[in-house]
Amino acid sequence: MKDIKDDLSKKLLEQKNSGNLNNKQVLKTCQEIAQNFAHLENGIAVLSDLYNNKSYIYSGKIADELAIFKKDQIQEIESIWEEELFGKLNPDDVLQKYLLELHFFQFIKTIPVEDRKDFCVISKLRMNDKTATKSLLHKMFYFSNDYQDVELALCLYNFDFSLAQQYEGAILNTATGNIIKQNEKENEFFLSVREKEILKMLQAGKQSKEIASLLFISVNTVSRHRQNILEKMKVSNTAEACSIATKLKWI
């Protein structure tokens, strides 16, 4: 999980084409949206300033129920990650959320700036407590500046009306209702059949030469597949790739 989160952090925090937050009016507007959401929905809104690596957290009554963010209804933290909230969530779901947000960031860069506000990530997140009778609904929007940097991220959390039995997530066009990417369905195809086959063999302790012999392919082909797996999963070694793929039930 750490490598996927670190890769996402790097992509978000290292844009900075213009040097500082470009549009103060957009920041003010987003702060008002966040505060109104927390008040109206009793939810939690986290507005992250990606240029300055900090977040504004607006807490409704859901925060009291979860026993988090007790200090003030409006807080400012020196991070773009709401770790206090993540600690209440199923860690496998948080991993899935990071992975989908990484795809979302890559996707949003292909969309014209004026249309980006029409897209969001939506996730159903289970609680860390297995006896919990509630789950959370999470939505995230990116806001870009004239340099096409994503300078603000707005995350909205409230209780889901149904108890999630597993992680569900999608990239959604809120203007049309079209699903751009659905994590649960597409995750099983994230790695190719051959990549999964090789990853299973690596997990079993087999070396590249042995894998090549068993699959009737060259060692160079095995090495290429291994490199593709690391690049796709944003991890630095096959041990971590095996661990994450097992958690996500890809292998």
Image (cartoon, rainbow, N blue to C red):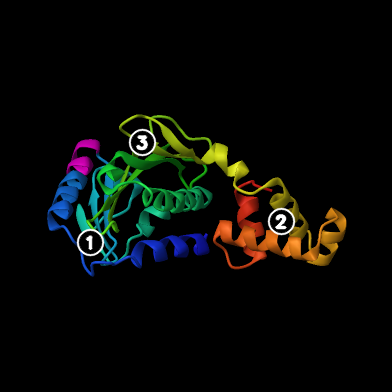
Residue that label 3 marks: 173
Q: Do the residues labelled 2 and 3 touch (CB within 8 Å)?
A: no
The mark total stands at 3
Question: In this view of the protein, which residue sits in the foreground, 64 or 242?
Answer: 242
Residue at 61% across, 51% down: 247
Disc 2 crowd, CA 10 A, few/some/many (<14, 14-19, 20+):
many
Q: Are marks 1 and 3 in contact (CB under 8 Å)?
A: no
Q: Do the residues labelled 1 and 2 touch (CB within 8 Å)?
A: no
Q: Which of marks 1 and 2 is nearer the N terminus?
A: 1
Residue that label 1 marks: 76
Instruction: Give the magenta range.
Output: 36-41
Give the Cα separation between the discs numbered 2 and 3: 34 Å
Disc 1 crowd, CA 10 A, few/some/many (<14, 14-19, 20+):
some
Residue at 70% across, 50% down: 196
Let me know if residue 64 appears in the view: no
Residue that label 2 marks: 199
Q: SS of the residue at dot 2? A: helix
**Which quadrant of the figure has residue 134?**
top left
Which residue type carries mark 3?
Asn
Q: Earlier in the sequence, mark 2 or mark 3?
A: 3
Residue at 48% across, 35% down: 164
Which residue type carries mark 2?
Leu
**Which quadrant of the figure has residue 72?**
bottom left
